Image (cartoon, grey):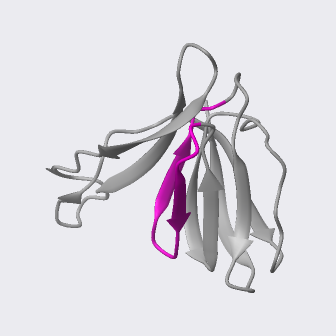
Amino acid sequence: MQYSILLEDAEGVSYFEDRTVDVPFREFAPPAAPLQISELYPATGFVFLTLPAGWKGVQHRSPRRQIAAILSGRFRVEAGSGEVRDFTAGDLFWMEDTTGAGHVSSAEDGVPATMVITQLG
């Protein structure tokens, strides 16, 4: 399983990196057959979030370490490095830029962007 992560360099400039999650077969809900599942990541809560159609934010840091699962729309993120990535339904976006200059995000294509954001412990 792949995701994009937004990290920060020593100067606080955010940048993207692609990562892969290992999802080996394991028992999860016996007596159901084993399925592919990652390690457990501690979380503190989650929110449902909608960026209205045409919404564009200002440069900001992520409020916490968090991961977004995009449900619908096109969610655009511009890292401090200038790289721009678009995320659509089914994409995962992990945010670790909590101390530097941050990033800019927006809802594209004239439709809302909806997601579930899980805040990590």
Q: Is residue 27 magenta?
A: no
Residue 102 spot, x, y in % from top left? 70, 35
In the rendered image, which quarter is residue 90 located in?
A: bottom left
The residue lying at 61 percent from left, 75 percent from top is 74
Residue 114 spot, x, y in % from top left? 69, 73
Toward the top, the furthest residue is 10
Residue 26 spot, x, y in % from top left? 18, 50
The residue lying at 72 percent from left, 50 percent from top is 104
Q: In the image, which residues are magenta?
A: 81-97
Residue 104 versus residue 56 in the image, above or below: above
The residue lying at 71 percent from left, 56 percent from top is 105
Residue 17 versus residue 91 in the image, above or below: above
Q: Quadrant of the C terminus?
A: top right
Camera-side residue of 116 and 61: 61
The residue lying at 58 percent from left, 33 percent from top is 14
- Is 13 on the left-hand or right-hand side of 47? left
In the rendered image, which quarter is residue 73 located in?
A: bottom right
- Is 117 on the left-hand or right-hand side of 35? right
Q: Quadrant of the N terminus?
A: bottom left
Residue 78 versus residue 5 in the image, above or below: below
